[in-house]
């Protein structure tokens, strides 16, 4: 019996380790998408370290990262939601009340991050979608599948409608024209000399005021375009958890291989199609970020799990990625803060950078994140934001939890007394 318990504990530990590595990959990969926005810097012509020969890095980075790691992060968010649901059921807690409180906190956190740091923040969108999806986890699996299909169909219908209407949001990583998605005049109204000739902010407060003043325009992706896809991916993540993808058995291994082969074959082919002189490349390009990218995300999920199981997840890189995954919220927010300070005109002003400089910047910031996460976890059990987050999530329920624990202690005490009485008789 003890051997079986140890085996189950080891399997649970591997599941947690694999989820931490996956989260770390998703966080670092999301930075590879966003870093192109930050390195625009102060506007003007970018600095090429190796001349025009490095331009191939722009489409390569875009093909690898744009929307793919965000899709992976969304899948993992759904997995996390499923884990919290099972924990609530196991501990006799009502679902989804605590999760809705958690989502409200995430919404507030996302607004602060949006206003003070980064206009393409994902936390607010995740919070709103999470509020809607959480109650659905009470459904039986077959009905959850139906909800997942409906969310996917809705997303595809809206995507096709936007494509036919000529509105493509194929991605802003490496485009060099991300600001052009919005009304250029809206960036300058009311700030006078706070904006330079390239439409870039020269002060931090001008940047914050612009984000808050143009809240709805800058939140179109998070509130209108992405939610059906995010809902689909959240539900897929929950279903994959229920299906046992993260276990260490033959079925889980087969599922991982199918995801890797299917996602990378189909998604990779469509991604390459966008960059080749083939018929229909414009259509594929229009669907790249929100339809093709999620397919690749499934492939990334399967491939990483296959590699972790073959190599045991014990390598140096796996451990450092797991460190980032354990401090995912902290690393996600801090990587944007670091990039903002380094590349903004009011900060160190290191931009604008060419493709090679941008990729090198991503590598340096990613290495700093891994190093910082490793150092922090040597002294603390969770990341800095995670520690505050845990306290805020649990604070309103401490009294109820204490009463519940007291009842459990009384029941256990009575059960022990009864066993003792029976044994004595």
Image (tube, rainbow, N blue to C red):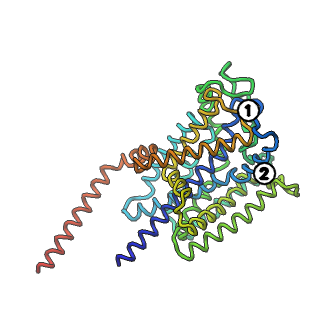
Rendered residue at 57%/35% (across/down): 117
Q: Nearer the viewer, residue 52 or 398?
A: 52
What secondary structure is found at the residue carrying circle 1? loop
What mark, if any, has residue 286 been given in the picture? 2
Rendered residue at 53%/37% (across/down): 112
Q: Residue furthest bottom?
A: 425
Q: In which quarter of the image is the C terminus?
A: bottom left
Q: Would residue 132 be seen by someone viewing this image from the given angle? A: no
Q: Which of 376 and 100 is in front in this view?
A: 376
How far apart are the alpha carbons under marks 1 and 2?
21 Å
Q: In this view, does 146 lie above or below 221?
A: below
Q: Is residue 194 above or below residue 344?
A: above
Q: Nearer the viewer, residue 332 or 131?
A: 332
Give x and y (percent) for residue 384.
Answer: 44, 43
Residue at image mark 1? 183
Q: Residue furthest top?
A: 193
Assess disc 1: are there few (<14), some (14-19) or many (≥20) residues with their C-alpha within 10 Å of its C-alpha. few
In screen coordinates, is 46 left or right of 402? right
């Amino acid at each position: 019996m003890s051997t079986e318990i140890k085996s189950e504990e080891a399997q649970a530990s591997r599941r947690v380790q694999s989820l931490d590595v996956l989260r770390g990959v998703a966080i670092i990969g999301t930075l590879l998408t966003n870093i192109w926005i930050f390195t625009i810097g102060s506007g003007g012509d970018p600095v090429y370290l190796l001349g025009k020969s490095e331009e191939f890095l722009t489409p390569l980075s875009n093909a690898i990262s744009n929307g793919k790691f965000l899709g992976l992060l969304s899948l993992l968010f759904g997995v996390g939601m499923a884990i919290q649901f099972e924990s609530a059921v196991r501990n006799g807690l009502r679902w989804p009340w605590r999760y809705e409180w958690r989502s409200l906190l995430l919404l507030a956190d996302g607004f602060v991050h949006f206003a003070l740091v980064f206009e393409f923040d994902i936390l607010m969108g995740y919070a709103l979608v999470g509020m809607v999806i959480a109650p659905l986890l009470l459904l039986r699996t077959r009905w959850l599948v139906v909800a997942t299909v409906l969310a996917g169909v809705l997303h595809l219908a809206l995507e096709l409608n936007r494509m036919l209407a000529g509105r493509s949001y194929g991605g802003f990583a490496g485009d060099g024209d991300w600001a052009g998605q919005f009304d250029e005049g809206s960036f300058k109204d009311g700030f006078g000399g706070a904006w330079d000739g390239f439409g870039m902010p020269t002060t931090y407060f001008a940047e914050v005021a612009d984000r808050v003043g143009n809240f709805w325009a800058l939140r179109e992706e998070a509130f209108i375009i992405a939610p059906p896809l995010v809902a689909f991916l959240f539900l897929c993540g929950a279903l994959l958890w229920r299906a046992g993808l993260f276990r260490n058995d033959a079925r889980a291994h087969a599922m991982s291989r199918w995801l890797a082969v299917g996602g990378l074959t189909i998604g990779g082919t469509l991604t390459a199609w966008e960059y080749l002189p083939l018929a229909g490349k414009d259509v594929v390009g229009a669907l790249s970020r929100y339809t093709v990218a999620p397919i690749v995300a499934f492939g990334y999920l399967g491939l990483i799990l296959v590699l972790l199981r073959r190599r045991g997840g014990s390598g140096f890189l796996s451990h450092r990625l797991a460190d980032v995954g354990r401090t995912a919220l902290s690393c996600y927010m801090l990587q944007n803060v670091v990039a903002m300070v380094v590349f903004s005109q009011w900060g160190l002003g290191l931009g604008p950078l060419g493709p090679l400089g941008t990729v090198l910047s991503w590598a340096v910031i990613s290495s700093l994140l891994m190093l910082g996460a490793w150092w922090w976890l040597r002294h603390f059990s969770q990341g800095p934001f995670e520690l505050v987050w845990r306290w805020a999530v649990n604070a309103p329920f401490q009294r109820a939890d204490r009463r519940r624990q007291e009842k459990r202690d009384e029941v256990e005490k009575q059960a022990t007394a009864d066993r003792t009485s029976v044994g004595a008789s």
